[in-house]
Image: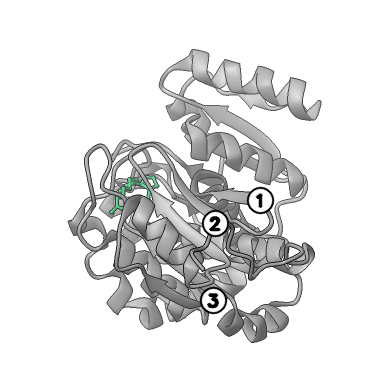
Amino acid sequence: MTRLTTDDIQDVRFELNAYDRHLVSVTGQSLLGIGASAAGVRDVGQLRDAAPSIPMAVVPIRSGLGVITGFVETVCGILVHMGFDASVTVNSDVSGFAEAIERGAQVILAADDDRFVAFCPRQGKTVDNSRATASGFVAGLDRMAGGLAGKDVLVIGCGPVGRWAVEALLKRKARVSVVDQVTAKAADLARWIQRAYHSTIRVASDTETALATHQLIVEATNAADVVHARHVTADTRIAAPGMPCGVTPRARKKLAGRILHDPLPIGVAAMACQAARIIAEQPLSSNPTAHDGESE
Ligand code: 2YC
């Protein structure tokens, strides 16, 4: 998993209105719409109406390599942009989680060096960023392609996001091929998919051949120069969750808007919509105001 840098995210929260307009021009949907589609929420209007009454907290985590300047503020900015009642806790780590619960947060988002997770404490559920990011970018590709059912889609990169992208694509009835610079990883994924979903996906022999025969692509590697201008045709559409972007600047110019890429927004939007769905579908715990061991 690639660790974001402050440079990757420093402008994101200030440019969300422009990014929303870009998403509408590329997919016909805003960040909320893509997040809702990723989470299987059909009524976006109902989600928009419910968002202001869903308190969310983003907790800084100092473990391991420590905080990334701007990370929790950017996550919070995306949630507020979508209409959720979100804020960053004053405290970090355990104190931050306690503060979030005591302030009544129904969703708590936090990331250490290994995982970025949204917690729904009252429902006892979690939403993982890798899976949400994959479903968000596949939802966007679906809109760019005018539907994925029966269409050939290539997933480049068999890490966490690539693996979950295969699941999201199979749910949308796409015909999936996977390729990884480590062929064994692609073969392992194909075996896992066969066992877990009784579905068959194809393992491409190498990226160059695979790119020559696919127009719908999910680029989920942590490399920079995977898709080049020579691979881009008028029918090419790319969802590129990988960080750094695996599509070269010349390829992105040639795609002229038929590409989705960002360091956080689509993944956070999908996490928030999935969490909102969990809350809507599972009633609150029996006594949500109870504070066990609270000092009298
Ligand atoms: O600021 C903080 O609270 C840090 N503990 C956040 C560390 C995030 C590390 N993970 C990443 O940079 C990204 C995730 C956003 C998704 C994959 N890698």
Residue behind label 2 places its C-beta within 8 angstroms of ligand 1: no
Instruction: Tell me residue 104's x, y (percent).
Output: 54, 71
Q: Nearer the viewer, mark 3 or mark 1?
A: 1
Residue 144 is marked as none
Q: Nearer the viewer, mark 2 or mark 1?
A: 2
CA distance for labels 2 and 3 = 44 Å
Q: Residue furthest front?
A: 296
Q: Secondary structure at mark 2?
A: loop
User: Which residue is at 46% across, 32% downward?
Assistant: 157
Mark 2, residue position: 293
Does any portion of residue 179 appear in the rendered image? yes
CA distance for labels 2 and 1 = 20 Å
Mark 3, residue position: 30
Which residue occupies the foreground of this view, 268 or 295?
A: 295
* In this rendering, position of residue 251 left or right of residue 53: left
User: Which residue is at 75% across, 26% downward?
Assistant: 196
Q: Secondary structure at mark 1?
A: loop
User: Which residue is at 70% across, 52% downward?
Assistant: 148
Instruction: Tell me residue 235's x, y (percent).
Output: 55, 55
Q: Quadrant of residue 175?
A: top right
Residue 131, compared with residue 177, is above or below; it is below
Q: Earlier in the sequence, mark 2 or mark 1?
A: 1
- Circle 3: is it few (<14), some (14-19), or many (20+) Cα within 10 Å? many
Mark 1, residue position: 124
Instruction: Tell me residue 257's x, y (percent).
Output: 43, 66
What amino acid type should be assigned to the residue bearing mark 1?
A: Gly
* In this rendering, position of residue 213 left or right of residue 116: right
Q: Nearer the viewer, mark 2 or mark 3?
A: 2
Which residue occupies the foreground of this view, 68 or 293?
A: 293
CA distance for labels 3 and 1 = 29 Å
